[in-house]
Amino acid sequence: KTDSDPKLDVYKINEVYKKGLSIPDYQRPYKWRVENVRQLLDDLNHHCKQPNSTYRLGTLVIHKGKDEDKDKDKYDIVDGQQRLVTLALILHHLNKDDASINKFLNNKFTHPVSHYHIYHNYQLIKQYLGALDGNSKTSLREFIQKQCEFVWIELTNQNEAFQFFDSQNARGKSLAPYDLLKAYHLRAIPSDHPNKLDYVMRWERAIDGTPSLDQVISETLFCLRQWSKSRRADEFTAKQLPVFKGVTLDAPYPYLNAVRANLALYQEHQANPWRMVQPSPSPFQTTQPLIDGELFFMYIDHYVQMYHRLFDKDQGALNGYFLTYGTSENKKQISYLGAMDYNGSHRTGDGYLRILFYAMVLMYYDKFATHGLDVALSRIFNWVFRVRLDNERIDWGTIEKIVAERDGLFDVLLHAIHPKQIANFIVMPLSKNNDKSVQLAEYLSAPKSSSQKEKS
């Protein structure tokens, strides 16, 4: 057994807080709600009344590192923050002079979400414990400190700590790949950077926002970055984190010169917009080399905003572009976003088609903005959704197959330098063995109540 091997132990609560635990800045905010706190209080109060009982509160995953400023060991919480903060609030109310608890609560809780939940949860704790008499409070405090315990898993390699946590079936929600990305790129930003908290807050808002980080990172950027290198994009997991890892901006590599030039142009425009005739330049492209740290957060935020600008169901730009179908005597129109809300659009295979459509449109807009967008939308829409009529069953392999087609529309768009190349693309007709004579747009815009044959 070496020093780098995981350390497994069981510690009583009073031993845990004496370790001097710290909450690293890459952690999620403290989000436990009052109902979670009440459940924990009820559980503790119940087990406290059982003599000589031991109550195990779960598993802590800890990264043991070095505090360079104080030249001593540092214990960062990777998993277990929610329970540890809640227990500390309970013990603080039961004994406000406990030095180890007070030290733990002096950790920096910078996120407003943490402030909100700490305040409201502590109000509940005061109300709940206020109903107990003095002896009951003493018994509860001693029970928590001496009879409650955690399984302690200590790792010295931070990446291993994240991977270990991601594989556990612990209470609560395990880290998603984008949580690990946040941690990786935050480490590349100096702790005193003035915008560091702003990047964290934007990231947290986007996790469950519209669009969500999962839509932008997992379903769009990950797919585009993988497909552009002729690689599969089945699922974005912790194993694919290198897809979004980059280098430092000052790395001495010639291929970064274009990235540095784009960034310099963008910064010049931001500082002196009146000096530049051209529209505000974007310092990013979907498939560009990535720069670790601050520029990664700017990159993601840029595409979160672009995704919303294009596809928001109420304000998205695609609401202003219409698909025309029907006969010359009876032409009909439907917006591209509306055209995807068709009978059977809830099916898994149809969801894959939407992922492909959104990714293709975002990639086009990223290259050409609105130049030729009306024609490009028609080409992309028909190329993507003709698959619905041409296949009895659609799985992710179907998507990967058409994306990988040599001289297919994705291949053309990836290498296009002018909108005309997309406008000139010919969408091949349906297979001869397909007996549907109805137009694609008419099929997809059929009323929800219409009887279409269900497909995968």
Image (tube, rainbow, N blue to C red):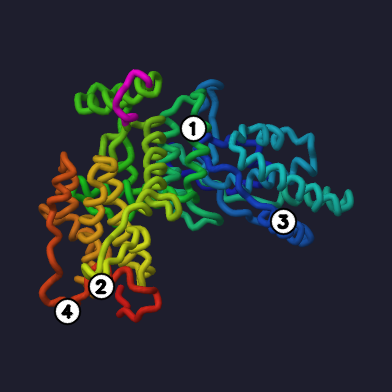
Instruction: Give the image location of residue 451, x and y in percent.
Output: 34, 81
Name the residue tied to disc 3.
Answer: 38
Local crowd at mark 3 within 10 Å, few (<14), some, or many (≥20)? Answer: some
Local crowd at mark 2 within 10 Å, few (<14), some, or many (≥20)? Answer: some
Q: In whole angstroms, how far apart are the C-alphas of marks 3 and 1? A: 34 Å
Q: In whole angstroms, how far apart are the C-alphas of marks 3 and 2? A: 48 Å
Q: In whole angstroms, how far apart are the C-alphas of marks 2 and 1? A: 51 Å
The answer to whether the residue labelled 2 contacts the one labelled 4, judged by CB atoms less than 8 Å apart, is no
Q: Is residue 280 magenta?
A: yes
Instruction: Give the image location of residue 50, x and y in percent.
Output: 76, 62
Q: Give the main secondary structure of the magenta stretch.
A: loop
Q: Earlier in the sequence, mark 1 or mark 4?
A: 1
What mark, if any, has residue 65 been given in the picture? 1
Name the residue tied to disc 4.
Answer: 435
Local crowd at mark 4 within 10 Å, few (<14), some, or many (≥20)? Answer: few
Stretch of the chain drawn in magenta: 274-281
Q: Nearer the viewer, mark 3 or mark 4?
A: 4
Quadrant location of residue 338?
Answer: bottom left
Q: Earlier in the sequence, mark 3 or mark 4?
A: 3
Q: Residue at x 33, y 37 (%)?
A: 245
Name the residue tied to disc 2.
Answer: 393
Q: Nearer the viewer, mark 3 or mark 1?
A: 3
The local secondary structure at tag 3 comes to helix
Report whether 418 appears left or right of 359: left
Q: Residue at x 28, y 24 (%)?
A: 260
Q: Nearer the viewer, residue 8 or 219?
A: 219
Report whether 41 appears left or right of 211: right
The local secondary structure at tag 2 comes to loop
* Residue type of the residue flagged with mark 4: Asp
Q: Nearer the viewer, mark 2 or mark 1?
A: 2
* Residue type of the residue flagged with mark 2: Arg
Q: Nearer the viewer, residue 258 or 57?
A: 258
